Amino acid sequence: TQSKSPDEEPMARRITPRSEDYNQWYVDVVLQAKLADYAPVKGCMVIRPNGYALWENIQQALDAMFKATGHVNAYFPLLIPESYLKKEEEHIEGFKPELAVVTHGGGKELEEPLVIRPTSETIIWPMFKKWIQSYRDLPLLINQWANVVRWEMRTRLFLRTLEFLWQEGHTAHATFEEAEEEALTILELYRSFAQEWMAMPVVTGLKTERERFAGAVKTYTIEAMMQDRRALQAGTSHNLGQNFARAFDVTFQNERGDLEHVWATSWGVSTRLIGALVMVHSDDQGLVLPPKLAPNQVVVVPIFKGEAERTRVLEAAEALRSALGDDVRCHVDSREEHTPGWKFNEWELLGVPVRVEVGPRDLERREVVLARRDTGEKASVPQEGAAQAVRDLLESVQANLLSSALAFRDQHTHLLDDFDKLKEINEAAGGFFSIHWCGAEPCEDRLQEETKCTIRAIPLDGEAEAGRCILCGEDSERRVVAARAY
């Protein structure tokens, strides 16, 4: 038999199967789908066009949601005077090991070191002090799209890198209740985005005191299950109380004419969401992307031999793209240096939700072939109604990805009251564990020491349920979700 040229080798053969090495599978998918690459600086990554297109779609969707809830965008400096961070001691202690510090500039040692932002509270609050005088200036609802640097020792593309992109919201309010409402509004916004756009079900809940953000009064989280049954913290929303307002003396005159400190929130999601998309939906052939976020939602692959067939088939392909209109991101792959089979493999690797095959025999039957990426199923549909069939299929793929991810999470969520059973299941397969916990930090520490699990969230939708702590047997008022996490 004639050997294939390297150009014709199926691209998915470069991907390590999930069952063989899940971590290597993840890296292979990210690299081979050209989402990111390793940067010259250890621990940093280059986001390639395929990955950045995903981030742009995430960014555009979230930005519209923020603006619809009254938030506006601004931008604050990358460099923060070291003394500013020291004003909020709990905050600086929380980030101290991760700080990157600039000590020289312009060939001279700086009078005061500058910290590259790990987050922006301490550079934003001095500005809030200038901008807020009266209750009429509140609420102040600011968001910024930015990069941050956290000097992580163990990094992984998208999930944990020295530098990453994110959005960070910072708001100031007249009362604790308004700040709490804001934090919960954003948490619901994140939950909605994860489910409706990413097709990723999440647990929404409160972090324990041990796990909450440095300087926060309350930290809320969305937690998603990856295909290796580990949890990924996909977004957080913090009620900061008056901690930062006191540290930076940000006050306002209330309606009674009295001065008081403002109440605050901060919240954010990052390019970690791209890692979540990979790990929730993708398979051993490469990326699987939800249609709402896929850079290319549809690819049309013309199949032809000779100039006569070429003209006819390309006209049909372009006609379909035109019929889909601007509301569907459609690409016609008219390259002639690759065979149709090679293109099928490439677009499968890149995760395009729907592939359309158009050949002379299809046109003779006045049909086109639709292939869906999530299940691999193929079907012929009438050429005349193909555009609507594609739209319907995109909706079907989006819905199926969510229902499949939800079924997977439910299958691997265990309601347990026996610690030995938790350890057994955790060691064998992992998953989410719905358990009773007394609220004591020693039990939380023991859980992590003996299982590497942490309490991911105290679910907001969890009903009160009297029980016994799975670790010490003391009274517990409700269940929490524990899991190993990234």
Image: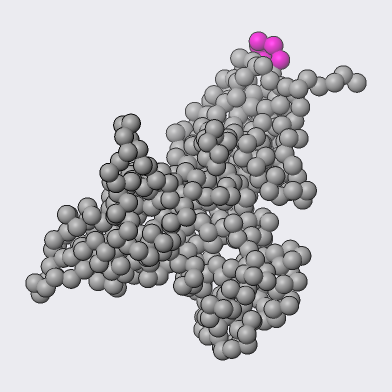
Residue at point 56%, 89% (across, down): 475
Image coordinates of residue 301 in percent, x first then y, are 64, 27
Q: Nearer the viewer, residue 418 or 406?
A: 418
For image coordinates 33% across by 46% down, the residue present is 113
Name the outermost residue toward the top: 307
Q: Main secondary structure of the magenta part?
A: helix
Visible residue check, residue 93: yes
Q: Which residues are magenta?
A: 305-309
Residue 42 in picture, x, y percent from top left: 55, 39
* Residue 391 horizontal/vertical position (percent): 54, 42
The quadrant of the image that shows the N terminus is: top right
Could you say which is closer to the camera, residue 173 or residue 301?
173
Residue furthest to the right in view is 1
Tell me which residue sits at (60%, 29%) in the image: 300
Can the viewer see residue 393? Answer: no
Q: Quadrant of the C terminus?
A: bottom right
| Position of 279 relative to 211 (above/below) | above
207 versus 297 height, above or below: below
Residue 83 picture location, percent across and down: 29, 54
Mark count: 0
Q: Residue furthest left?
A: 257
Question: What colour scheme governs how the chains and residues are painted in the rendered image of this protein?
Answer: one colour
Q: Is residue 84 left or right of residue 415?
A: left
Please state which of residues 92 and 72 is positioned toward the viewer in this rendering.
92
